[in-house]
Image (spheres, rainbow, N blue to C red):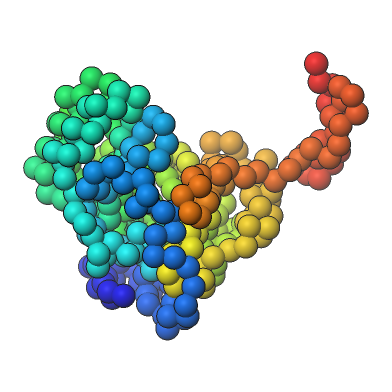
C-alpha cells in the first residue's frame, strides 16, 4: 500500500488532538480485513472513471490524486491502481442516457486538477441539456484551503447550478483558512454541503460531532451526510459498530437543530448502495394510534389518520 506524504497545510495542523489519526499510517492497518473495492464500484463502471449506480446521477472519478490521502479512504486501492478517466467516453455515455440529471465530480480530489482541466469537464457537462446539477466533492477546504481562490470560485460560478460537497471529520479542521475559503464560495451563491465519516477514536463522541456540525452551520455549510466508515482494506481500526453509531445519532437528533443534523448513512457492501438509518422512535401502534418516544426519551401518543 502506497504511503502518501502529508501536504504543507496538514503538517501545520498535525499537532492537533485526535485529528491527525486520519492521516498517519499505523501498523494496525496491516491486520488483514476489508475489501479492495468495498462498494463494488467496478461493477457499476460504464466507461473509464464513470460510475453509474443510481437512476438519475453518476460519479466521475476524474483523478486518483488527493490533498489528504485519508487512511480510511474507500477508494485507496486507486492510489496505486487507477485505470484513469476518459472525459470523451464519459460525456458520450451521459449524452446517451437522458435520465441522468446530476453529475458528481469526484476522485481522489478533482481540485488537484488544474483549473483548465476542471473547466473542460464542467464545460462539456454543461453542454448536455439534461444535466441539471453538478456537484464537486473536495477535501480542499480542510487540506489545501488556498486552492480555493477568486479564480477557482469564478470558475465554479460559470457552471451553476453547482454544489460543493466538502469532506470534513473533526472541528479542529475548521481553521481560519477554512472559514475564508467557505466564505468565498458561499458569498458567490454556491451552496456548500458537508460529508463526514464516523471514525473510531477521532470523532465517535457526541461532543466532537455536535461541535463540528454546529460550526459548519455557522459557516453556512449544511451537514449533509454522516457516513459509516466503509470496509476498505485495513479500515478495521476506524470502524464504529452500527449500534454505537445509532446511539450517537440518537443523542444528537433533537438536541441540535435540524439544519445542523446530517443524515446517517452507510454503503452496503457488494454494491448494495446507500442506506439511511435513524434510531427507531416508534414504540408501538394500536389501530390508528401510534406511540412514539421523543428525543428526551418521553412517550407520546399520536393520532394517525
Ligand atoms: S479526501 Fe476523499 S478521496 Fe481523498 S483520500 Fe480522503 S476519502 Fe479518499
**Nearest the camera: 250 or 257?**
250
Residue at x 31%, y 46% (from the top left corner): 45
Residue 86 shown left or right of residue 254 in the figure: left
For this orientation, the residue located farthest to the left is 116
Residue farthest toward the top in the current orientation of the protein: 305
Relative depth, front residue between 293 and 280 = 280
Q: Position of residue 291 (x, y in %)?
A: 85, 33
Q: Residue at x 47, y 41 (%)?
A: 224
Work out whether 285 lies above or below 249: above
246 vs 192, left or right, is right
Whether residue 226 is visible, yes or no, is no
Residue 161 x %, y %:
29, 26
The image quarter in which residue 96 lies: top left
Measuring from the top left, give residue 78's x and y in whole percent: 28, 61
| Quadrant, the C terminus | top right
- Which quadrant is home to the N terminus? bottom left
Residue sitting at x 78%, y 44%: 296
> What x and y, as percent, mark residue 61?
27, 49
Question: Outermost residue, bottom direction?
Answer: 27
- Viewer-proximal residue among 84 and 156: 84
Amino acid at each position: 500500500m502506497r504511503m502518501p506524504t502529508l501536504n504543507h497545510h496538514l503538517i501545520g495542523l498535525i499537532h492537533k488532538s485526535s485529528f491527525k489519526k486520519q492521516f498517519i499510517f499505523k501498523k494496525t492497518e496491516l491486520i488483514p480485513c476489508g475489501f479492495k473495492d468495498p462498494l463494488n464500484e467496478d461493477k457499476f463502471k460504464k466507461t473509464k472513471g464513470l460510475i453509474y449506480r443510481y437512476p438519475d446521477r453518476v460519479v466521475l472519478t476524474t483523478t486518483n490524486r488527493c490533498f489528504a490521502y485519508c487512511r480510511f479512504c474507500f477508494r485507496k486501492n486507486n492510489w496505486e491502481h487507477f485505470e484513469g478517466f476518459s472525459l470523451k467516453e464519459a460525456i458520450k455515455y451521459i449524452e446517451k442516457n437522458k435520465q441522468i440529471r446530476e453529475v458528481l465530480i469526484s476522485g481522489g480530489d478533482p481540485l488537484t486538477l488544474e483549473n483548465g482541466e476542471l473547466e473542460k469537464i464542467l464545460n462539456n457537462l454543461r453542454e448536455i441539456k439534461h444535466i441539471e446539477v453538478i456537484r464537486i466533492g473536495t477535501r480542499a477546504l480542510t487540506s489545501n484551503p488556498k486552492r480555493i481562490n477568486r479564480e477557482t470560485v469564478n470558475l465554479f460560478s460559470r457552471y451553476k447550478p453547482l454544489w460543493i460537497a466538502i469532506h470534513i471529520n473533526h472541528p479542529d479542521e475548521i481553521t481560519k483558512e477554512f472559514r475564508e475559503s467557505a466564505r468565498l464560495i458561499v458569498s458567490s451563491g454556491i451552496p456548500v454541503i458537508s460529508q463526514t465519516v464516523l471514525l473510531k477514536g477521532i470523532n465517535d463522541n457526541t461532543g466532537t460531532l455536535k461541535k463540528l456540525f454546529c460550526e459548519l452551520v455557522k459557516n453556512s455549510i449544511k451537514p449533509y451526510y454522516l457516513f459509516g466508515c466503509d470496509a476498505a482494506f485495513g479500515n478495521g481500526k476506524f470502524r464504529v459498530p452500527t449500534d454505537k453509531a445509532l446511539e450517537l445519532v440518537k443523542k444528537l437528533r433533537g438536541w441540535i437543530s435540524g439544519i445542523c443534523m446530517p443524515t446517517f448513512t452507510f454503503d452496503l457492501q457488494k454494491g448494495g448502495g446507500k442506506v439511511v438509518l435513524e434510531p427507531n422512535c416508534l414504540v408501538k401502534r394500536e389501530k390508528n394510534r401510534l406511540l412514539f418516544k421523543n428525543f428526551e426519551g418521553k412517550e407520546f401518543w399520536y393520532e394517525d389518520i
